[in-house]
Structures are given as C-alpha cells and as structure tokens.
Amino acid sequence: MNLLSFFNNSGFAYLEWGNLMMIGVGILFIYLAITKDYEPLLLIPIGFGVIVGNIPPIEGMPLSVYAEGSVFSYLYMGVMKGIYPPLIFLGIGAMTDFSTMLSNPKLILLGAAAQVGVFLTFLGSLFLGFSPEQAGAIGIIGGADGPTAIFLSSMLAPELLGPIAIAAYSYMALVPVIQPPIMYLFTTKKERRIQMKPPRQVSKKEKVIFPIVAFLICALIAPGSMTLLGMLFFGNLLKESMVTERLANTARNGLIDTVTILLGFSVGASTQAQTFLTAQSILIFVLGAASFVVATMGGVLFAKFMNLFLKEKINPLLGAAGVSAVPDSARVVHAIGLKEDPNNFLLMHAMAPNVAGVIGSAIAAGVLWSALGKF
C-alpha cells in the first residue's frame, strides 16, 4: 500500500507519451548545441527547460510555470510580461558597432527588405484562420529575432507564446542550415565572388549622435517599437559615449547572460506536452519556417535588384544577413563568401544589414502592435 501511494505521488504516475517526446526534443536541443555548436547559449537553457517542464507535476503541488505561486511561474512572468526581451536588447546595443552601417547606408535597405517575410507570413496566417493578433505574432518569427517574437506575442497573443518562442529560437539556431541553400539557389558564382570596398572610418561624433537620432526617428514612426529600440539604442549609447564603460560592460556581459539564462530556461519550461503538442503549434512551426525562408529570399533578391541601378555592385549574399539573427547570419554570409573566394571578407559588411535587420524587426513588431493591439 505504501509503495502504491509512493508511485501515485510520483511523476511516473502522470507521465504521458507526449512528455517523453518533448523530453526527447529537449535532449536533441542540448545535443545540437554541444556537438554542432548551434547557438549553445540559447539551446542548452531551452533544452534543459523543456526537460524540466515535461516532468509531470504532482496534483496540489505548485511546480510548473503555469501553476500559480510556483517558483517557475515567477521566472516565467518575465516572459509573459515582456520584461526579458528589452533587457536583452540593452545588452545587444552595448555590444553592437553600427560603424559599417553608417559608412554604407544603402545596406540598411537590405535589413528592411528582409522584413517582407514578416508581413507575407502575417497575411498567410490570416488566410489559415488565425486571428489578426495571432497572425501578427506568428509573422514576426520571420525576423529571426527571438526576443522580438517573445515581446510581440506577449502583447498580442500570449496563448501562443510557447510555440512562437520555441519556433523563433529554433530557427535562429538553425541559421547555418536554413540559409545557405537559399543563398546558393538565388545567386550565381560570379555574384558570390563580388568583393566589397573597405568601409570608411566613422567618427566618434557620428557614433554618439546615431543612437539618439535613430531612436527619435524610429519611435516617432512606430511608437510600439519604443520599448525594444529604446533599450537597444540606450545600450549602444553606453558603449559609444566612452564614459560609461562599466555600465556598458555590465549590460553586454553579466546582465545579458543572466537574462538569457532565465529567458531560455523559462521558455523551455513552458512547453508542457499537454498544452504544447497541438496541431496549432505544428502549424506555427511550419509558418515560422516559411517566414524565415521568405525573409532570406527577400533580402537576397532585393540586393540583386539594387545592383541593377548601382555602378558599384554589392554582393547579394549580404541580403541574407538582413534577418536579425545577430551575428549568425553575418557569419554564414562571410563563410560562403570565403568558400567562393578565400580573399572575399564579407563579415564587417554583412553586419550592416544584420544590425539593420534588428532595427527593422523591432519596427515591424511596433507597427503590428500599434495596428492590432487592443488598447
């Protein structure tokens, strides 16, 4: 009788096949992070969070992220209330150098062009029967920006937060797998070998003025982007002012690392099979993949379009870096450029559309929030 009582009060009594499947997914994430080096700073916290989240809680014990009063529910509140994403943007701003973008402003257009995936997926989601709010949250996955996707879905469609967050971070981690075939498909060998001129030297004054002016322009165009871009440009000002180095170091090291751990683990722990494994979740993953593919295509094709009018051609591979998976997309562009020509160094040039993509996805999220939010 005591053994039976012990069994009934253990997780084994409530374990379902769905939980085992999700635990397998968590282990797969950890495996990919360790053996393939796919975004380990994200996949290891998320993967272990998935494992923790799929241990069935005992009835009456507040253990899961959805149980009121549980420790995990308080950690998850930073996701639900949109607290973690702006803090991550603060750290990103403190480690971002906008010099290449400022030295070659036309590359900003590639970051804007890549946002086509966001809005086409939004329309596709509407067609498939999602509500406008849900469609907006799903569409932003195409920006390949996990914090932005979490922030927007927490504002527009919190009921879809789990699958959207997992989809966004999964595709961020799989940038080296997803993007190269698209880049090869839409470019020729000759185009991939185009070399870019070294960027001009950007003055300190330009670097200090840029985050202030850029924030004012972006926030006035799309007030909904103010939370994310305000923190991004604030972090960048801490870096570029050269008088707040301690604060910049904290933002780009200790703070962003702490928040990444909490966000990744909390998102993973929210994937309980009983609420996560649904047809709707699978459809979100499919739409997210389509969104990311279209965003990459949009950037590459727009770069080719620009070359029709430019005397000094740009390497169309740079268009793939228009998604805001910083710095992974830029690294992939650089790697393919080197593969075609060992003397073709594209990393610094690719960072321009890459950071422009971060700004672009935040503006897209702001526009969708302003248009679809219920205030």
Image (cartoon, rainbow, N blue to C red):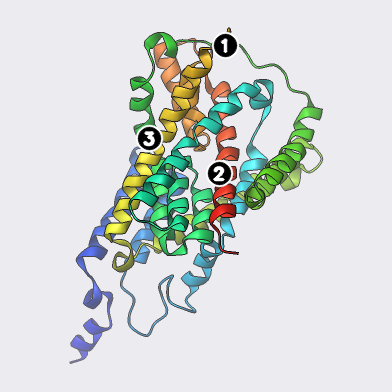
Residue at the image position 35 percent from the left and 26 percent from the top: 182
Front label number (3 vs 1)? 1
Residue at the image position 50 percent from the left and 23 percent from the top: 318
**Closer to the camera, 121 or 299?**
121
Q: Secondary structure at mark 2?
A: helix
**With 116 as the anchor, is 85 left or right in this view?**
right
The picture quadrant where one finds residue 191 is top left
On residue 310, the disc is 1
Q: Which kind of residue does numbered mark 3 sit on? A: Val
The residue singled out by tag 2 in the image is 364
Q: Could you say where residue 157 lies in the image, as x and y percent from the top left?
A: 46, 61
Distance from Cα at disc 1 to Cα at disc 2: 27 Å
How dense is the environment of label 1, judged by Cα within 10 Å: few (below 14), some, or many (20 and up)? few
Between disc 3 and disc 2, whose residue precedes? 3
The residue singled out by tag 3 in the image is 293
Q: Secondary structure at mark 3?
A: helix
